[in-house]
Image: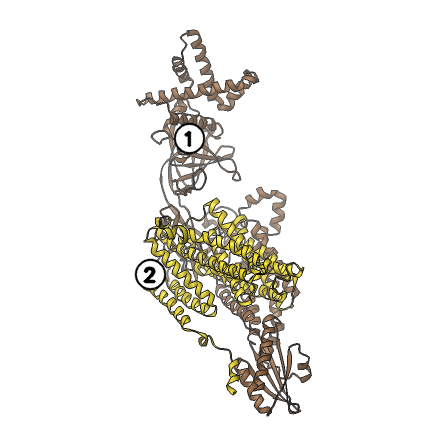
Chain colours: A yellow, B brown
Amino acid sequence: MNTQTYDFKPKSIWQTLRVQDWLYAVALMAGAFFAFSQYSEYMDAYELGFLFSAAITFSYLGWRWKGLAKLVVGVAVLSLFAINLYHGDQARAGQVFFLKYLISSQSAVMWMNVLFIFAMLTYWFAMFKRSDFAGRVASALTWSAVLFGFVGLMVRWYESYLIAPEVGHIPISNLYEVFILFCLITALLYLHYEDKFNTKQLGGFVLLIINAGVGFILWYKFDRGADAIQPLVPALQSYWMKIHVPANFIGYGAFSLAAMVASAYLLAKKGILATRLPSLDVLDDVMYKSIAVGFAFFTIATILGAMWAAEAWGGYWSWDPKETWALIVWLNYAAWLHLRMVKGLRGPVLAWWALVGLIVTTFAFLGVNMFLSGLHSYGEL
Amino acid sequence: MRFAVSMLSVLGVASIIGTVLKQNEPYENYIIKFGQFWFEAFEMLGLYDVYHALWFLLILLFLVISTSLCIYRNTPLMLKEWKTFKEQATEKSLRAFSHQASYATQGASEQAQTKLTDYLTGQSFRYQLKPQANGDVLIAAKAGTHQRLGYIFTHAAIVIICFGGILDGNLPFKVQEMLGNKKIEVLDIPESQVPEISRLNIDNPSFRANMTLPEGMSDDVAFVRVRDGYLVQELPFRVALKDFRIEHYATGQPKSFESDLIITDPDLDKPLEKTISVNHPLIYKGIAIYQSDFQDGGSTLKFKVWDLTSKEMLNGEIDGVVAKKGTLGPPDQTLTVEFNEFRKFNIMNLSADGKGKPRNVGPNTTYKLRDKSGQAREYVSYMQPLQLDGKAYFVSGMRETVQEDFRYLRVPADDDLSIEGFMRLRNVLTNPDKQGEIAKRLSQNSNTTDANLRSQFELSVMRLLATFAEGGFTQLSQVIEKAVPEAERQKAADTYFKLLNASAFEAYNMVLAEQKKPEMALNPKSVSYLQDALNAMNDLFYYGTPYYFQLEDFEHKEASGLQLTKSPGQKWVYLGSALLVLGIFAMFYIRERRIWLLLKANTQEVLFAMSSNRKNLDFDQEFERTKQQLAQVLSV
């Protein structure tokens, strides 16, 4: 009988692991070692560090969140399958059936776009019909969109090397590519909260901002032809890009998510959709958590950016418009967090503020590129 | 607190100014943009270099002081909270908690106590036992108190980062400047003549300076730009540029910029050779040398120049060196030619819809023609013909002020992809001595045999050509407006237009005959060539100069733009950044929770109370869970 008392002791992560979790981690490590054995001579010490850190990070994240592990496996399998179909020839993207219609980078990204749109419609349908089933379908559609998006990026990474080995680079170097990244990260953050709090009713809101991104991607592709892979300008040829950009987009994604939750909060507070949305407490909590994640990663991203700037531009801080706006975004959320954590402020004020924060963030992300010039002119519109 | 948030807002708003108004531009640009009055007003506010303006530094200083005060006031409290178990809590206060419960227990109180402490340990709580005077026992437990360190770390980080920033800022210079010990130099004079008051010696602890080195040259000073002037920064070593390279991708976009540097220093046994590139600086004696940009280091240019006023097809040559000057024209109307820029590669997208691939269109050069009164026009000229709408043109642009865009002249290239054909055609077509022959040729083609009509026709062709030679299409339309009633103008214009085209055709054949080349075939291609040529002749009236420059040859010499920085504050900034990240994660992801369990000696009751410094959903859930688990623990 006495043993029962110890049942409450939280299990350490090692105790929770099942066979498949170990297989997953071993597969990731094996993949990293394979890449190391094949390509280590083309990577510098930092990039080797990133390679193994990525394997460890995604193992851990996959253990903590099983959905992510499935996604990683799916992305790996589909990407490797696509790469295998290329036979090292870029032209096959338009010839081989699977590549042409499914998993060449352009097709996969288009599937991502389409799936995100369907997911949004389904989420709204599920909310109005109060249908659990439709909610699960919407969730599955979002997961599929994320799967295709990441496959698209992976394959694009490979395709860039097919153009010429010297052109090859990670596809997070221009506005088109980072918009895909933005959609994916925002969706993943949302799916995480959905898993944790079972808040499928929020999907329709969050998918709004993601689909705004999708709209931009479509316009940028069809009107501007921005989907072509361009070689990297000298300033971007650095290992820093591989960590600075993703960290930044976790920040942008989380802030956008927070703003969307805030809009749901404000509606619910006014009694609109109140019975369909999660309780105000949950909305408030998700908004706070999202901003906290965003703030932490945005801080890291800005610091990484400063360290990169010290190496590329000769100074860790140059008051370049992009840097300055990053500071403004940071100050904005720092003030938000101060008021919440120190003053204990809650409610509509913070929700409105999170919405305004999205405008500031959007300006830092897009507006600076459109209206202001500076050192950061990689993503010009 | 309120002060801190307002401070953050003020800093944010102040920062915006500097992103909206382009910083550190040449002052003339601001004058043109704002006018004299606002220019001076803005200058007084320091808006052209906001981030180094005194008022901006003061805001930063306020932020640092306010944060420091915050740390000073709160740190002892935080440390106390971090250490304490709050074992002084009384039964009365515990019962007043919003999160509390009580349980009835059976059996010995020691047994319950063991079970509870085991449970707490299992939940990663640390605890202290505090027997009460009345025989009760209080278990005071805590977890996640490291969160309190997050506060100290983040706030200390802000102060440390700002401190590092101040070390690297130009505050010392500002103070020196106010004391009158230092002054910026605003004149463009050789470095050796810059007076001591505008020089910074090698002991200067921090700077960010630029150096432009042409290939094969060396220097031991760099320039620090300040407002509309500069300071000379002396270096403890000499930097020489052996070679500068730009590599390109197959598409023509630049792939890398590299400089082969040689550092000579008495402290070195032999010169230090190192290649730097973007993202790969060289650090020597605490000074980092970065590849920043590149420019022309004095390329030599060879132009062919046509004098468009001359009856003869007069052309000559002029040689120039980038950043130097030359002269042109007769003594009484001498023009100064300022060779401003030469670019070997120009990546442009010339496809009609703008969707095609950008490609390298070859070298171009920018020069200014300045007359004796000082008036100048700026020209840009491409060396090779550009493909526009499937046809080849020699393109050159002209503008009168820097604010304008270039207006482009497109001269069609002939079959040899040369400009020669156009120049010869223009020479024949606009030359009064040749216009008679053109007219004659045209009248021979006509059906009339009447000599009278013919000579009338020839006369009118000659008048037409003379008018066109005098002022292009504008002149022609003026003549039509004067001489022809409105209803018939369109018809007259069409006739003139046809005649002009036919004349151009004949004139071009005369050119070809002169060169003993076969006659021009009349086809859409030749028609469009002649049409373009006539348009170009017309546009030449707006070209602003009788001299047409065509770049024939060049010898490229590059200069590497280096940036040299010394920033002792950098390690402080990085230290602060590390603290900041640690602190943020501690604040967000460590949750401070406290549990009190009061074991009543007499009544067989256990009182449970729980608190957290942040009330949120997570805490409510944890309280509920703990409450249930405690009930189970106590029931067995």
- Vertically, is B486 above or below B253? above
Looking at this view, is A164 or B558 the one in front?
A164
* Residue A93 location (% of width, % of height): 37, 50
Q: Can residue A2 be seen in this view?
A: yes
* Residue A68 location (% of width, % of height): 46, 65
Q: Is residue B203 visible?
A: no
* Residue B632 location (% of width, % of height): 57, 83
Tell me which chain the residue with mark 2 is part of: A
- The amino acid type, in three-letter code, at marker 1 is Val
- Vertically, is B495 above or below B25? above
For the residues labelled 2 and 1, the Cα–Cα distance comes to 52 Å
- Vertically, is B621 above or below B500? below
| Residue at image point 61% right, 68% down | A341
| Mark 2: secondary structure | helix
- The amino acid type, in three-letter code, at marker 2 is Tyr
Tell me which chain the residue with mark 1 is part of: B
Q: Are marks 2 and 1 in contact (CB under 8 Å)?
A: no
Task: Find residue A268 and report its image quarter.
Answer: bottom right
List the residue tagged with mark 1.
B411
List the residue tagged with mark 2.
A39
Task: Find residue B180 and report its image quarter.
Answer: bottom right
